[in-house]
Image: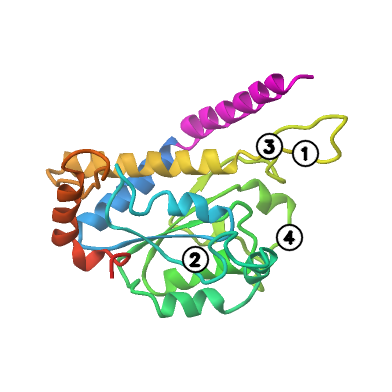
């Protein structure tokens, strides 16, 4: 079997998942986009969180050309990505009780804001506690997860619950347990994960919905332009000035 055939199989798998979330999650995407638009219109702030590779989709929303300037990354030290050494420490931190609460309590997040939480399995203490505590503080929570994990894995949070149990809106990425789309008789483990592709697409669909919903209400969505396009930096400077009290990654 040639490499090109495997490549085609991965693209087919990813496209199939994208079609599923487009069709099956349309209502949830609309609800999440509307919730974000409501929050922007009401003067609230936006935050995104993910641990490990789930952080990639959260980071994809922050300080992004074509994205909403108001989306801030809620970073947990050591859990954002593979920049921590050893990399296994990040996985260990996801299972630490109390860490999420401490991060939220010392963050700018407050009642009326929205927190997007990305966790493929939704079973670790960090995202579950993050969602529970955020709602206690009066935030709205949008969770992006694979609901299948809640049916076939055991929660690692003391409550026995999953991220999906503590969200105002749940976006199901449909990713199969194990996050690997391909197998071969000659390869001892499954390979080719698609969760980043699908989760990022889901969230960009949500942000597109939010921008369109704001425009429908006569509100200019606070979008960033590419700094590599003439006039982009000047545009962004005006957005940062107008919305500076709701943007925390510039301070």
Q: Nearer the viewer, mark 1 or mark 2?
A: 1
Highlighted range, magenta: 1-25
Residue highlighted by disc 3:
192
Residue highlighted by disc 2:
131
Instruction: Tell me if label 1 and label 3 are in contact, CB under 8 Å.
Output: yes
Q: Is residue 135 above or below residue 8?
A: below
- Residue 61 placement, left or right of 80: left
- Circle 4 packing at 10 Å, graded few (<14), some (14-19), many (20+), is some
Q: Nearer the viewer, mark 1 or mark 4?
A: 1
- Residue 180 placement, left or right of 108: right
Q: Secondary structure at mark 4?
A: loop
Q: Quadrant of residue 216?
A: top left
Q: Secondary structure at mark 2?
A: helix
Q: Distance from label 1 to label 4 (Cα)?
A: 21 Å
- The answer to which of marks 2 and 4 sits earlier in the sequence is 2
Residue 72's mark? Answer: none
Q: Distance from label 2 to label 4 (Cα)?
A: 18 Å
Instruction: Tell me if label 4 and label 3 are in contact, CB under 8 Å.
Output: no
Q: Position of residue 240 (x, y in %)?
A: 19, 59
Q: Is residue 68 above or below residue 27?
A: below
Q: Secondary structure at mark 3?
A: loop
Quadrant in which the C terminus appears = bottom left
Figure label count: 4
Q: Secondary structure at mark 1?
A: loop
Q: Quadrant of residue 136?
A: bottom left
Residue highlighted by disc 4:
154
Q: Nearer the viewer, mark 3 or mark 2?
A: 3
């Amino acid at each position: 079997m040639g490499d090109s055939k495997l490549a085609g199989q991965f693209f087919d798998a990813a496209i199939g998942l994208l079609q599923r979330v487009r069709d099956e999650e349309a209502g949830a995407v609309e609800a999440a986009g509307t919730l974000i638009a409501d929050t922007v219109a009401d003067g609230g702030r936006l935050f995104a969180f993910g641990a490990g590779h789930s952080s990639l989709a959260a980071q994809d929303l922050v300080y992004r050309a074509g994205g909403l300037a108001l989306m801030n990354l809620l970073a947990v030290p050591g859990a954002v990505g593979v920049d921590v050494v050893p990399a296994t420490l990040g996985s260990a931190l996801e299972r630490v009780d109390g860490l999420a609460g401490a991060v939220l309590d010392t963050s700018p997040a407050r009642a009326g804001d929205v927190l997007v939480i990305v966790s493929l399995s939704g079973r670790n203490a960090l995202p579950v506690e993050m969602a529970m505590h955020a709602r206690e503080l009066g935030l709205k929570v949008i969770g992006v997860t694979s609901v299948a994990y809640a049916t076939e894995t055991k929660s690692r949070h003391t409550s026995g619950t999953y991220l999906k149990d503590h969200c105002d809106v749940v976006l199901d990425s449909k990713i199969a347990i194990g996050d690997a789309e391909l197998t071969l008789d000659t390869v001892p483990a499954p390979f080719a994960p698609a969760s980043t592709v699908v989760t990022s697409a889901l969230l960009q669909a949500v942000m597109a919905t939010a921008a369109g919903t704001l425009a429908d209400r006569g509100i200019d969505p606070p979008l960033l332009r590419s700094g590599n396009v003439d006039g982009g930096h000047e545009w962004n400077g005006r957005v940062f000035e107008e919305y500076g009290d709701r943007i925390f990654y510039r301070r």
